[in-house]
Every structure is written in C-alpha cells, then in structure tokens.
Image: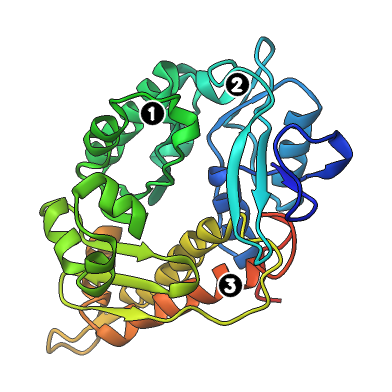
Amino acid sequence: DQIATDETVKLGDKADKWAPYPGGAPVNVACALAKLGTPAAFVGSVGADADGDSILGALEACKLPTVCVQRDKERQTRNVYVTRDELGEREFAGFSGANDGFADCATDLERVDGTLLYSASWVVTGTLGLAFPSTREAMMSIRDICKDLDILRVTDVNYRPVFWDGNKNAREEILRYIGGTSILKATADEVEFLFGIDRDEAMERPYKVLKTMGPECMGVLITDGAAGVAYSFESHGGVMDSFAVPTVDSTGAGDAFTAGFIHRTIGLTGAFQDEFVDLGEDKQYPRAHLPVKQRVAEAFKDKELLADAVVFASAVGAATCMEEGAIDAQPSLK
C-alpha cells in the first residue's frame, strides 16, 4: 500500500507524498492472526521485485511460512494508492500501472502446496481476485476444495470497484463465489450492492442477510466503520457500537477485525475438544473431536460466546486504526 501522508494528498502527487507499507487484505489477515498467536499462511502471488520482497519480509517478520507465496518474474507487485480524509478514513484511489498487469492477477493453482490446504481448518479469502481470470480460477478451485474437505470458509467481500474496471459482471461473479461460504463478512454498503438490502436495514436486521445467504452459511458479520457492527448466526445476533479511538489510519481495520474474530472463535470453540463424556463407567471418555464447523455452530448457540468473539474482533480492528500501516499497526496479545 502507498498511503497518503495527509488528507491533502491526491493520486498523481509526487512520490514523497506517499508512505509505502507492505500489505493487501489476505496478507493483512494472515499477519494479524500470527500476531494474535494463531498459526496461518498466505496463499497468493507477488512480483519478483523489491515490493514483493517487502511483503515476504512482513510475512517472515510475523513468522509465517512463505511456501505458498508465488513469485512472478513477468508481473510487478501491485501498489495500491490510498488517500485518507481528516478523520483517517481511507479510499482506494488507483494503482501504479495497468489494473490487469500485476502479479496478483495470475495466481496459479498448480503452484499451490496442496498439503498446506489439506491441513487447514479455516480458509479466508476476499473477492478482488475474481476480477482476473487466472486468480478467479484458482479461487473457485479452492472454494471447491473447502467444500470437499469440510473446511470452514470465511469470505470477506472487500469489494473495490477500482479493481473491476467497470466490469458489469462484478456482482454476479461475487455472488457466485460466496455461495456456500460458512461465514460472510461484508460492509453495509456491500450488502446493499450484492443483495439489494438497504444498508440501514442490514445493520438493524442482519438476520435478513443471513437468510439470503442460504443454509450453508452459519453466520454474517456486517461492519459499518465507526457506526459499529451487526451480526447474525443461527441462534443469536445483535448490534454493537464500535470502540471510540483516535483514528490515524483505518487501512486494514476490516482485515484485523476478521482476524480477531477468527482467533477468538478458535479459542472459544477449542473447549469442545477437551470435554469428557460420562458413560456411567469407572472412567470418563474423551469427547470425539468435532469438525470445526460443528464446533463453531455449537459454541455460538451461546449468545455470550458469540458476543465475546464480536467484541474481541471490534477491539482488534479499532486498535489497528490508531497507527499508520495495515500490518505495522496490528496489535498482539503481549
């Protein structure tokens, strides 16, 4: 990311008006998980250039494996120029080259380490890669792998029109991809764009979004920046205000929220692996390990556990707004 140094900077201004920070939504989520203590890995493609080196350096600094990071010798690493207003809220202004000429457009599934995917319990993706045929093919295949292996799939819509170059099929491509997702995270504006549900209605009645997603989706998380978050799972839902913090740069706050929710959910549902069952004999027997989807569904029948995960996620997202840089600003539990 190239972050504007202040609110007066606009696309086209000189290089010294922009501060470079390694990032990008999937990398941000992976790094935030690692900082919180949850093992993770990033799957994707970067250029064989200095910016690609910077992203690998960020992953390595977080002690994340890089075996699934592809280096593209023909395409450069994408630089996204991010402007911000006086309140620290950001807007994606454009790129340093042709939209379809960057390494992230050409992720090759054949080069993805299948062992790593096979060992995963959760897979998190956005939807920006769907704008580019090669990466779209890889993402669709990973979606199918998640279904076959019963991996819990989290989709953060993260819709950015600038990536789609006016493609009128963006909505249809995204809807096709998110079908069957286990947990959907979207902003209120993205909900309105995808489902035609008024953004205010979505925040007040998030269960309507969950019903629209179909039976395979166990829950939705709808964020609205400083206005807070609405959520709905099978048994419970609610609306929470955001944490009031001095915002310096909101880049990556949504990614940190996603990571915080996953990290906390894993911690809360881990107890279901440690229980013992009394069968009326001399000793108790360890409870059979439940698949991750079932553990989450069981845990979130308790509205307090669900609320706990959402509060934690909100706190992680808010903390990330207090410093510059999507990864540099992420909190740890130390």
Q: Residues within 10 Å of mark 2 (few under 14, many from 20)?
A: many
Q: Secondary structure at mark 1?
A: helix
Q: Quadrant of the N terminus?
A: top right
* Residue under label 2: 103
* Residue under label 3: 318
Q: Of marks 3 and 2, which one's residue comes earlier in the chain?
A: 2
Q: Quadrant of the C terminus?
A: bottom right
Query: Which quadrant would residue 16 be assigned to in this image?
Result: top right
* Residue under label 1: 130
Rendering coords of residue 321 (x, y %): 64, 67
Q: Of marks 1 and 2, which one's residue comes earlier in the chain?
A: 2
Dot 3 amino acid type: Ala
Residue for point 41% across, 76% down: 309
| 259 left or right of 245 in image | left
Q: Is residue 69 above or below residue 9?
A: above
Dot 1 amino acid type: Leu
Q: Are marks 1 and 2 in contact (CB under 8 Å)?
A: no
Q: What's the distance in space between the residues labelled 3 and 2, CA to CA? A: 31 Å
